[in-house]
Amino acid sequence: MNQNKKRISFFCAVAAIFLCVITTIQHIIFYKANKPDREIKKKYLSKEGEIAYQVYGAGRPLLLLHNTEIGASGAEWQNNIESLSRMYQVFVPDLPGFGDSQKQKITYTAYQYALFINHFIENVIQRPAFVVASSASADFALMAYALKSSNIRKLVLISPTALQKKFPDKKENIKRIIYQSPLLGTQLFLWAASKKEMKKCLTEKMIFSKEIVTKELIQKYYTMAHRGNQNARFTFASSSTQFLYADIEKVLKEIKIPFCVIWGEQNKSNPPEQMDLIEQIRKDGSYFLFENTRMLPHYENSTIFNETIHSFLQ
């Protein structure tokens, strides 16, 4: 009996040491990514937490909304801001749970992001705005329009994702719970947010031209992914399941403002055939297919993209 107690005590001690080591390593990784080398950004205290954002230029307001891949932030628009800010007052937030914005211990949903967009327009921009939105954020922007159409003047949708998704089922909910768990969820997040996986995501999913995927770009995504310490896993949990899904087909059928849809020809995870489906729903939109680009045509071919936006918004 005493021998069994000693064995149990030994294994418990080993397990405790192992957990302490793993937790310490996790804290060190997050600490290194959260060193004070951040850009100076404005702050807005919203219902979704503290939001970091930047403003450029003057003129009619233009809101740029980044994608929801791990490590995404307003930096996605760095190749577009200079050109667009010559004609517009450009607002570039880090979405709730991304970049330098607050990362809360919640399950993020498309509905919450749609509410955020409307809150940001009403409380920060304070007048109806043009909206350019990337990937899943294009779905959120459509939902925001459905909730309050008067906030948005024109919409630019870059490869919206919702037509090929569905609402989360029981399996997706179990995955979400695992991803949100303190130890295992954090470890899964750190694996997905490693520089190796970040490079893989950028080169195989997001960007077609491999020479564009520099060490600096990988570092930027890596740093932004780890902001917020262990809370970063909650956004990852929502975006890795179906909890950011939005039913956009009905909105597309009923939208009454000018809109255009832009797609990367080499987008493998969300192929351009999806744009054909949108065009079948609404033939009166403007549609543009960018050659030799994937998920981020505005980043890869910024010159043509900026010209397209200027032409569409004028």
Image: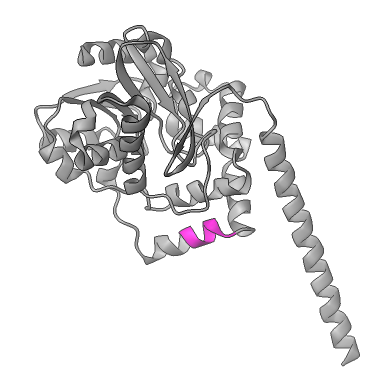
Q: Using the image as rendered, state which of residue 59 and residue 31 is in the foreground.
A: 59
Q: Using the image as rendered, state which of residue 63 and residue 32 is in the foreground.
A: 63
Q: Using the image as rendered, state which of residue 151 and residue 162 is in the foreground.
A: 151
Q: Using the image as rendered, state which of residue 136 and residue 94 is in the foreground.
A: 94
Q: Main secondary structure of the magenta part?
A: helix
Find the magenta span and give its range: 176-181
Question: What percent of the width, then of the height, locates residue 123?
Answer: 35, 32
Establish if 285 lies above or below 160. Answer: above
Say if the magenta span includes residue 71.
no
Q: Going by the image, does 144 lie left or right of 109?
A: left
Quadrant of the rendering where the C terminus is positioned: top left
Image point (42%, 20%), residue name? 299
The image quadrant that residue 19 belongs to is bottom right
Say if the magenta span includes residue 180.
yes
Establish if 212 lies above or below 124. Answer: above
Image point (42%, 44%), residue name? 47
Question: What percent of the width, then of the height, locates residue 302?
Answer: 38, 14
The image quadrant that residue 141 belongs to is top left
Does any portion of residue 264 appear in the rendered image? no
- In this rendering, the count of numbered labels is 0
